[in-house]
Image (cartoon, grey):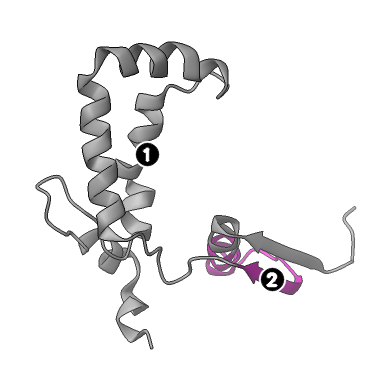
Amino acid sequence: MGSTTPNVVLGQSMGGVIARYALKDMENKGLPHDPRTYISHDAPHLGANVPLGYQFAARHGRSQYVHSPFQLLGGEVIVPLCTDGVAVSDLLKLVYKPPAKHMLVQRVGPNHATDNTPHTQSQPDSSNRT
């Protein structure tokens, strides 16, 4: 049998967004989740704000990294020894993955223009910010 004690759901940072999504998904499917308390700490529920200057710098740094054989050798051979086998080129690609696109309020797109479409489509209530 299961426990009769209500759940306490705690989400830190992105875990808060994932916990909220999971609880809502369970509600939509009619599954019992019985949370007594839901705590979300420092979670980007309305999206993440990364200054555009940082995004442009990261894009420039990535292109310089990819074109530099010395950094490529160091990043692809030495860094994976410290990151459980994850290469720097793979880490630099994370910003282009769908979750990052959806979380960034303003994102630098592939043509170096801001592209907020993925965020506004996935966060329909984001226009109601105060």
Give the number of the disc on residue 12: none
Instruction: Answer with left or right where residue 82 lies relative to residue 118.
Output: right
Spot occupied by residue 9 in the image (x, y as percentages of width and height): 72, 64
Give the amino acid type for the residue marked by disc 2 in the picture: Ile
Foreground of the two, 38 or 108: 108
Q: Say which residue label 2 marks.
A: 39
31 magenta-colored? yes
Instruction: Name the side, left or right, on which 7 lies relative to 51.
Output: right
Helix, strand or loop for disc 2: strand
Q: Report the front residue among 98 and 90.
A: 90
How far across and how far down the image is residue 1, in percent?
90, 52
Q: Which residues are magenta?
A: 20-41
Name the residue at 27% across, 36% down.
61
Question: How far, Cα to Cα, is label 2 from label 1?
Answer: 27 Å
Looking at the rendering, which quadrant does residue 117 occupy?
A: bottom left
Residues at badges 2 and 1 in contact (C-beta under 8 Å)?
Answer: no
Which residue is disc 1 drawn over? 94
Instruction: Report whether 114 appears left or right of 49.
Output: left
Disc 1 marks a residue whose amino acid type is Leu
User: With respect to residue 68, does 35 lie above or below?
Assistant: below
Which callout, 2 or 1, points at the residue further toward the start of the chain? 2
